[in-house]
Structure formats: structure tokens, C-alpha cells
Image (cartoon, rainbow, N blue to C red):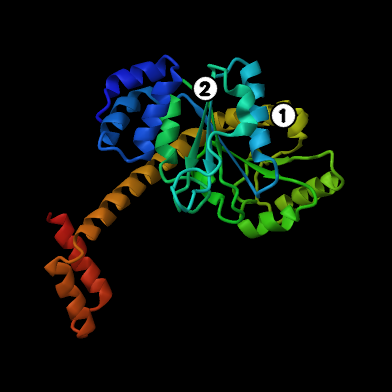
Amino acid sequence: MLQDVPSLVAAAREGRPRAVARLISLVEGASPQLREVMAALAPLTGGAYVVGLTGSPGVGKSTSTSALVSAYRRRGRRVGVLAVDPSSPFSGGALLGDRVRMADHAADPGVYIRSMATRGHLGGLARSAPQAVRVLDAAGCDVVLVETVGVGQSEVEIASQADTSVVLLAPGMGDGIQAAKAGILEIGDVYVVNKADRDGADATARELNHMLGLGESRGPGDWRPPIVKTVAARGEGIDEVVEALEKHRAWMEERGVLAARRLTRASREVETIAMTALRERIGDLHGDRRLSALAERIVSGDLDPYGAADSLVEALAEG
């Protein structure tokens, strides 16, 4: 059933959660109305500060996200949460659904929480996450927290989707080595050692600080990622995390980094949409005589695969 997109957008701007939910569902389901939705939202976006949270399973991402929501709400900010879950192998939907650990915020009209399934997409994010963030941005959220799926060593995509990336670690999990292996030492703007009441928290922070300093080539005035120790389950250290985030945002705005990151993010979003459309067009050629003819020439040795690909691209460009 077709939705009244202008009415949905207007209701979302008024903070009505059902309208926000419907818009994200249209995005996630790649609805035929997706283009209409994005066109309607475009003039309303750009105001939200997007914070990505990533880290290995068990470090307390959901608990930390919930604590950050509380901290921002105390500051009077409207908060959107996009919690990316692994997909059910049967339904394709998010396994955990709306997070039970964030139930404290369920009745707060200033908070919107949505779970999304990865649907097989690597990188810790759902493919439609950028468009879902746009919905939350247009709906008037001051801060959008994007929590990745927590699959280990494929989480670096969050760096290209957020204004600020927060990497969470915990003592006793070998996360120092894992962080180096996963490449997340290169993507973090703020590092959080959660569960700091456990033995080894100080050692984890020292190890992380040492690893961040290895081969460091930062100049005067460059951002050095802070390391904040927290006990998210008790809300300890969360205000310090928010302060670190605000400092990073101010630094980015002063240096023009925030605008540059958002420009890069928009470029990648356009590229992804274009590549998806191109793959669909190529998929439509399966069984097409033109593609079969190119394949036959490759098998016979008359044409190499690169030449065949060039011919295919030219044919697609000509329509």
C-alpha cells in the first residue's frame, strides 16, 4: 500500500514515532517510494550529530549506548538510536529486535530507538543505514547514535558513516591485540575502556595508549583520540565520554573536518546507490544475447574479460 509521504514526513518532524518507524521501514524495504522519501527529507537534514559506536562482542556497546542516551537527554537533546543487529537466517530480520537493554527510554518521546538487520552486509552496518540516519536527522534528532553489530574484525565501515567514531574495549578480552588486527586503531576518534571496575582496566588503557602512539605522525593541533574509562552499567564515566565527543565535534568544526567528512560520506552514499543500480542493470542482462555473446568470445579466446567488461559498460551507457 502506498504511503502519503508528505504527511509522514510532517508527522515525523512533529516527533511522532509511528511516522518515523514507517519512513525507516520504507527505507529498509527499498520501497518504490524510497526516492520520494529521500527527496522530501533532503531539505530537512544536516542538523544531527552522528556518533558511531563499535567494538567486539561483550564490551558493553548496548549498555554504553543506553547510558549515552541518558546523558544527552539530561542535556535536553533529542536522541535517535540505530542499533544494527545480525540477521535471522530464516526471516532476514534483526535477531534482537528493539533493544531490551534500552527499555528505560521506551516511554521517552525525546528518544527514538530502531533495530536494523545487516541482511548479510559486512562492515557491521546495514546497507540502508545511511538512509535511516537521514530519517532520524530529518525527524529532529540532535544526536544519532549508530551502534554496529559487533562481529569482531569487520567493523571499520562505521568510520565512513559517522561524524565521530567511538571504539569500545574491555579489560581481559585481549582487545588491544584485536584492535590492532581489526584496524580500528585507525578509525577511532574516542576510545572507551568499559567495565573499568574489572582487573586489568588500567593495563588495557596503558596498552591502548601505547599502541595509539606507535608511529604517530600527528602535528601540533591535530586531534589525539582520548581514552576514557567507564562503567556504563552504573553510568560512571559517561559524562566524560560526552565531553570528549563535544570536544571532538568542536575541533572538527573549527578545522573544517566535519564538513569534509560529511562531503565524503555523501559521495560514498551516491557511489553505493549508483553501483547498486548498475548491478541491477547487469543482473537484468543475464540470459541477454549481448552478454552471452561476450562470454562466448572470452571462451573462444577472441576477447579478454576486461575488453568484454568495457563493451558491456558502453552498452549500458547507451541504454
Q: Which mark is residue 41?
A: none
Dot 1 crowding, Cα within 10 Å, few <14, some 14–19, many 20+: many
Which quarter of the rendered picture does the C terminus lie within? bottom left
Residue where numbered disc 2 is placed: 142
Q: Residue at x 60, y 15 (%)?
A: 76
- Dot 1 or dot 2: first in sequence order is 2
- Left or right of 14? Residue 65 is right
Q: Residue at x 19, y 85 (%)?
A: 300
* Distance from Cα at disc 1 to Cα at disc 2: 18 Å
Give x and y (percent) for residue 309.
Answer: 24, 68
Q: Relative to 134, is 270 above or below?
A: below
Relative depth, front residue between 243 and 280: 280
Relative depth, front residue between 246 and 3: 3
Q: Residue at x 41, y 31 (%)?
A: 134
Relative depth, front residue between 136 and 17: 17
Q: Residue at x 38, y 28 (%)?
A: 22
Give x and y (percent) for residue 74.
Answer: 65, 17
- Left or right of 209? Residue 12 is left
Q: Which mark is residue 238?
A: 1
Tell me the kind of residue under disc 1.
Ile
Dot 2 crowding, Cα within 10 Å, few <14, some 14–19, many 20+: many
| Residue found at the far front of this picture | 90
| Residue found at the far right of this picture | 199
Tell me the kind of residue under disc 2.
Asp
- Left or right of 6? Residue 169 is right
Give the SS element for disc 2. loop
Q: Give the image quarter of residue 152.
A: bottom right
Give x and y (percent) for residue 125.
Answer: 50, 46
Q: Give the image quarter of residue 176.
A: bottom right
